[in-house]
Image (tube, rainbow, N blue to C red):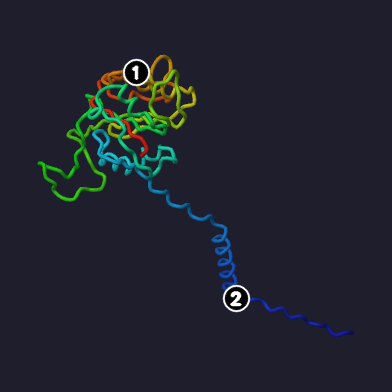
Amino acid sequence: MKGLRWRYTRLPSQVEDALSGEEGEEEEEEREEETAPAPAPAPEEPVAPQLAEASQVLGASEMRQVRAQSMLSLHLPPRVAGHSWSLAFCTSRDGFSLRSLYRQMEGHSGPVLLVLRDQDGQDGPMLRSLKGGAASGPPAPFQLQTANSSFEMFGAFSSSAIRLSKGFYGTGETFLFSFSPQLKVFKWTGNNSFFVKGDLDSLMMGCGSGHFGLWLDGDLYHGGSHPCATFNNEVLARQEQFCIKELEAWVLS
């Protein structure tokens, strides 16, 4: 009878089991770290339009507020980001005349930022830290208010210069906006291409069902704003019909 042979198998101890378990968890964590997606980069700070001179309608304080709210500058086409804007026309300097606006636009082919304030709007802004005509301390960044916290301004961005035309022209970069006091931007809907049309006696931006998103008369005194299919905009001013207090047209320097 042959003798029996015994085989011995060494079993891992509890300590070894724990160590091997920790090593496995570390390996899984390393794999998860390798496969985890990289964090998204922080959004870039919007570059506010740079005005080459002071504006009676859109002053530096308003521009800082718009920049702080990451609004208007984000809606301008990338091709104009960071560029300086020059005042090509303003009613206080060049008079209330649409023909004068056309003359001042001659030689310019690029985009135009049209800003205006009507007579129902309030006066310019004041820093909140101002009291009794003197500053009570350093103001908080970008904080401002008007005499009754109701500063209003509205206008349009045109992808092309304002000019006389037989029909509508422009591109889908054109948009309308209002600021009362929060900025609202009304982009092209794609429903039609009635962006800008310049006549001797009127300037029209956006159209649909016989209504214009923004309309100005030949004297640059009366204007109107209605919802239109081009931009699906709200009425930009307090009333559909308004009288212009100040109008400015800015072009790329």
Q: Is residue 198 above or below residue 35?
A: above
Q: Residue at x 42, y 30 (%)?
A: 160
- N-term-proximal mark, 2 vs 1: 2
Query: Of residues 98 and 4, which is closer to you in this image?
Result: 98
Q: Is residue 90 above or below residue 26?
A: above
Query: Of residues 200 and 235, which is closer to you in this image?
Result: 200
Circle 2: residue type = Glu
Give the Cα distance between marks 2 and 1: 89 Å
Classify residue 187 as left or right of residue 100: right
Q: Toward which corner of the image does residue 62 lie, by quadrant? A: top left
| Location of residue 207 in the rendering, given as x and y in whole percent from the top left corner | 42, 19
Q: In the rendered structure, are the residues bearing label 2 and label 1 in contact, judged by CB atoms less than 8 Å apart? A: no
- Spot the residue most to the top: 210
Q: Toward which corner of the image does residue 244 lie, by quadrant? A: top left
**Badge 1 element:** strand
Classify residue 46 as left or right of residue 131: right
Q: Which residue is mark 2?
A: 16
- Spot the residue most to the left: 132
**Badge 2 element:** helix
| Location of residue 192 in the rendering, given as x and y in whole percent from the top left corner | 48, 22
Query: Of residues 80 and 153, which is closer to you in this image?
Result: 80
Q: Which label sits on residue 52? A: none
Q: Which residue is mark 1?
A: 202
